[in-house]
């Protein structure tokens, strides 16, 4: 059985997908970009602020499912410029205190709405 997770505190999907899907003890959060859910505008004033907005969107979805960043077991980071990796990595790391999730970071040629960073996560309840 799968359960669709949806919150107004994160951007509405811009395509045929759900913000997150829960099955068993796993939550699969779709890739998030820096859309501010209150204004529906991109928040890309700096790579740090863009990454913070992405992480705030992920946090809102996790909270809707009754979880937080301590439940994240896997993250995927997509960057359009690997030169931004150190700044994205520092911002990303500020959302975790210990027991960091597994992760990969890859450079891609383009992301939705021409943003610089997209992050998806998988979280576990147990």
Image (spheres, rainbow, N blue to C red):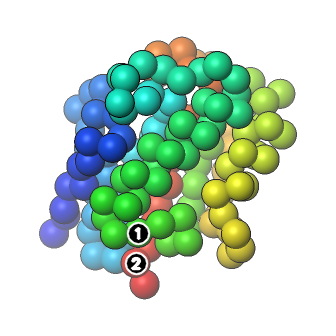
Quarter of the image containing the C terminus? bottom left
Q: Residue at x 29, y 33 (%)?
A: 13
Residue ID for mark 1: 67
Q: Is residue 8 left or right of residue 123?
A: left
Q: Residue at x 25, y 55 (%)?
A: 5
Q: Residue furthest front?
A: 38
Q: Is residue 14 left or right of residue 90?
A: left
Do tag 1 and tag 2 residues touch (Cβ < 8 Å)? yes
Dot 1 or dot 2: first in sequence order is 1
Residue ID for mark 2: 125
Give the percent coordinates (x, y) of residue 115.
56, 21
Q: Is residue 80 visible?
A: no
Give the percent coordinates (x, y) of residue 72.
53, 66
Please tell me the numbered disc located at residue 87.
Answer: none
Q: Residue furthest top?
A: 114
Helix, strand or loop status at disc 1:
loop
Helix, strand or loop status at disc 2:
loop
Q: Is residue 4 visible?
A: yes
């Amino acid at each position: 059985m799968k359960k669709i997770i949806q919150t107004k505190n994160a951007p509405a999907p811009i395509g045929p997908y759900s913000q997150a899907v829960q099955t068993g003890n796993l939550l699969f959060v779709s890739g998030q970009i820096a859309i501010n859910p209150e204004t529906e505008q991109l928040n890309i004033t700096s790579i740090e602020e863009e990454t913070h907005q992405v992480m705030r969107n992920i946090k809102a979805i996790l909270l809707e499912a009754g979880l937080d960043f301590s439940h994240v077991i896997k993250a995927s980071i997509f960057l359009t410029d690997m030169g931004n990796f150190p700044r994205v990595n520092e911002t990303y790391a500020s959302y975790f205190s210990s027991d960091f999730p597994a992760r990969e970071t890859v450079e891609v040629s383009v992301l939705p709405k021409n943003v610089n960073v997209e992050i998806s996560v998988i979280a576990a309840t147990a």
